[in-house]
Each structure stands twice: as C-alpha cells, then as structure tokens.
Amino acid sequence: MVALATRTHFSSLRPRARVDAGDALPVGALSEAEYMAVDMVEEIDASGIAGAMRGRLPDGVEIVGAAQVPVGSPSVSESIARMTYEVPSEGLDERAAAAKALLTSDKPIPFTRVRKGREVEVDIRDYVDELAIEKGGVLRLTVLVRQPAMKVAEILQALIGISVDEARRLAVRKVSVEWK
C-alpha cells in the first residue's frame, strides 16, 4: 500500500519530478503503510494519479490514495509522529509480557546504540508509545519517531532480549503510521 502526496514545483531550470519516499523500511520488514511525496513539474489532479499508475508499479505495490500538499511542506520523514508494527511473537509471549510490565514501570530501559563507531545510550521507553500482545500470538509495537532514530530490531532487542539478527528474521510488518 502506498499513499501519495503531490506538490507542484515549478523551476526555470530543468523542471523535473522529485520523489520523497521517506525513511527506508527496516531490513526484512514488510509494509502495509508506505507514503511518498512527489513534486510534479506541472499541475496534476491528485485523484487521477492512482489510476494513471495502475500497471506501472511492481507487483504488490498499489496506490491507495493521493492528495495535493503545498510546496514547502515538511518531508515525509519529518511528518510522521509514530509507526505501528506487528511482530509474530510465537515463543516470545512470556518475554513480551515482561517487556510490557517493564514499560509501565518508572525504571529506565537503557540501550546503547552504535552509529559510525559512536556509542549513545538512550532510554527505550522514550521510543515506545505502546506494546500490546494480541490474539493469535502477535506483538503490536507502536514506535515514536524521534532523534536519534532507533531501529525496530534494536527496540525488540532491548525489550524482549533477542539479538538484532533474530529480530530481523521475524516477519515484522509496518501496519500504520500516524501523522504529526
């Protein structure tokens, strides 16, 4: 699923369409909630884009909506407040329940993230808006978009004690985003 926003951008020098697809999906994750903004070189009715793109996108990619947004609007990445993921939790239910209890306590959940050789300690509670264990063995994790950014695999590592590699092997699915 892709929702599309269009902005008309006129330039006197080589007008061209520009695409802002936001942040990359985590390695190995699937998505039902991807968004992009496309700067157009001429005014186009946003409602007709989905039909015009039908058959031109890879299998499994479908535009489900389109809207016009003003030029100068924040990027897709800057516009998202939170993202919700579903993770199969078979065999992890006990750990997920312990993580949920830990999130409701006042105790920090420290995690050291490493980027470009630099270590930064963060409190995972600052990144997790909600953690629920749903019927059918699914962990529903709602992550706040903040800086410095945290990878879903890192959050799972800190909360349920699995390695980043184990987290990447899970069938993580982004199911929704909430805009600021």
Image (cartoon, grey):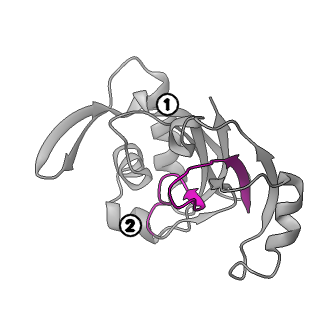
User: Which residue occupies 81% across, 55% down?
Assistant: 44
User: Which residue occupies 35% across, 50% down?
Assistant: 154
Q: Is residue 23 magenta?
A: yes
The amino acid type, in three-letter code, at marker 1 is Ala
Q: Is residue 79 visible?
A: yes
Element assignment for label 2 = helix
The amino acid type, in three-letter code, at marker 2 is Glu
Element assignment for label 1 = helix
Question: In which image quadrant can residue 180 be found?
Answer: top right
In the foreground, 137 or 141: 141
Q: Position of residue 156 (x, y in %)?
A: 42, 50
Q: Residues within 10 Å of mark 2 (few under 14, many from 20)?
A: few
Residue 166, disc:
2
Residue 120, disc:
none
| Image quarter of the N terminus | bottom right
Q: Position of residue 92 (x, y in %)?
A: 50, 56
Question: In which image quadrant can residue 60 be found?
Answer: bottom right
Q: Position of residue 145 (x, y in %)?
A: 48, 36
Residue 100 left/right relative to 154: right
For disc 1, the marked residue is: 101
In the foreground, 61 or 4: 4
In the foreground, 81 or 142: 81
Residues drawn in magenta: 1-27
Q: Is residue 88 visible?
A: no
